[in-house]
């Protein structure tokens, strides 16, 4: 048991948390005469360490996930989903969303393709909710800052929101609120060519590099914001707005997160800094969910595919689910951390 505990601690602190990298950055800045305990040195340390840590995790994750994803092209995914019915179909769809693109904007074209191919609307919405909210990247990156238990519960609750949300949309029979051009799209079921191992590795490398170039600006901005919060914003301010003193902190964090646009890699450093300053765990997780799931650009894209009533229902379901998840984590925070 002690061996397993030591192994888990090593994975958490050294592999995921990269404590060795933090110490290395501290040593290098110290050699340059900078005090990493002061606001300027601390900000620079936070910025360099988090950018390097997130980029290393990002490239590793995208490569692995893209390799897995090469086995699930849209045509095969459609066939897999078509084999299931009822709640099971929603669950499989939500699980499939965890190994697909990292942001809602890149998930929407797949959602449109699945819907146009004739899959049940509730099933495709379960995919659309889970894809940006609980991808495998969020699991590993959350583990690096809050531990495995919190990250796993976060993913399970996100999947629950996706399954319940898709089921509600299915039961309400909202198909008439999908734009006609989506429903009338020709059902082209092309057979994907069989890929060799070399092809899959090449695909994974291309996806890794392409995604890295796309999300790096958000990492840069997110870490910059996090370094300011971490070293310059008084703890009393954060605790007053997002701590236990404000019972509406979860609602506030969710509403603030919706207009923003980033992905899990850009929001992680902001979340890390807010937690350090005393924000409640559930409040921070609600902020992350809102940013990645309900950003304005993705809602504008989704409006091209669905009519206002269905879009409003989708936003309402996601918002309610995110807020409930936040209050749940706040209620059990003393057990988890």
Image: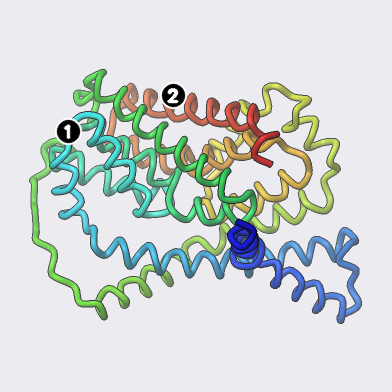
Expressed as whole percent of the image width and height from the top left, the position of residue 223 reads 67, 58
The foreground one among 228 and 158 is 158
Figure check: 199 above or below 55: below
Q: In percent of the image, x 54 and y 46: which residue is there?
A: 151
Q: Report the residue marked by disc 2.
A: 316
Expressed as whole percent of the image width and height from the top left, the position of residue 289 reads 52, 39
The answer to whether residue 103 is seen in the rendering is yes
- The tag on residue 239 is none
Q: Report the residue marked by disc 1.
A: 85
Secondary structure found at label 2 = helix
The answer to whether residue 181 is seen in the rendering is no
Secondary structure found at label 1 = loop
- Taking the view exactly as shown, the residue that stands out farthest to the top is 172
Q: Is residue 18 left or right of residue 190?
A: right
Figure check: 7 above or below 286: below
Name the quadrant of the C terminus: top right
Expressed as whole percent of the image width and height from the top left, the position of residue 145 reads 64, 53
Q: In percent of the image, x 32 and y 25: which residue is there?
A: 310
Q: In percent of the image, x 30 and y 48: which residue is there?
A: 96
Q: Which of the two discs, 2 and 1, labels the residue nearer the N terminus?
A: 1
Q: Is residue 176 left or right of residue 12?
A: left
Give the image quarter of residue 28: bottom right
Give the image quarter of residue 15: bottom right
Q: Is residue 256 left or right of residue 298?
A: right
């Amino acid at each position: 048991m002690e061996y397993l505990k030591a192994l888990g601690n090593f994975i958490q602190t050294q592999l995921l948390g990269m404590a060795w990298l933090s110490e290395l950055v501290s040593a290098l800045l110290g050699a340059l005469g900078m005090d990493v305990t002061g606001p300027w040195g601390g900000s620079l340390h936070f910025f360099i360490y988090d950018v390097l840590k997130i980029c290393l995790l990002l490239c590793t994750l995208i490569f692995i996930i893209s390799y897995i994803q090469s086995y699930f092209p849209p045509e095969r995914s459609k066939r897999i989903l078509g084999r299931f019915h009822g709640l099971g179909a929603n669950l499989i769809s939500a699980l499939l969303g965890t190994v697909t693109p990292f942001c809602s904007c890149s998930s929407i074209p797949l959602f449109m393709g699945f819907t146009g191919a004739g899959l049940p609307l509730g099933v495709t919405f379960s995919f659309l909710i889970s894809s940006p909210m609980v991808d495998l990247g969020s699991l590993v990156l959350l583990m690096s800052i809050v531990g495995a238990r919190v990250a796993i519960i976060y993913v399970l609750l996100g999947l629950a929101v996706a399954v319940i949300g898709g089921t509600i949309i299915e039961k309400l029979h909202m198909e008439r609120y999908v734009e006609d051009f989506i429903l009338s799209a020709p059902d082209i079921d092309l057979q994907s060519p069989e890929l060799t191992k070399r092809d899959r590795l090449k695909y994974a490398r291309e996806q890794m590099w392409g995604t890295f170039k796309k999300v790096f600006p958000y990492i840069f901005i997110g870490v910059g914001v996090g370094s300011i919060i971490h070293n310059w914003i008084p703890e009393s301010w954060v605790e007053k707005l997002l701590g236990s003193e404000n019972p509406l902190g979860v609602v506030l964090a969710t509403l603030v997160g919706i207009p923003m646009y980033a992905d899990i890699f850009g929001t992680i450093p902001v979340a890390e800094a807010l937690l350090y300053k005393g924000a409640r765990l559930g409040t921070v997780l609600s902020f992350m969910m809102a940013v990645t799931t309900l950003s304005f650009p993705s809602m504008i894209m989704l409006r091209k595919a669905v009519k206002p009533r269905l879009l409003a229902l989708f936003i309402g379901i996601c918002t309610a689910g995110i807020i409930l998840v936040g209050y749940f984590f706040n209620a059990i925070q003393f057990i988890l951390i």
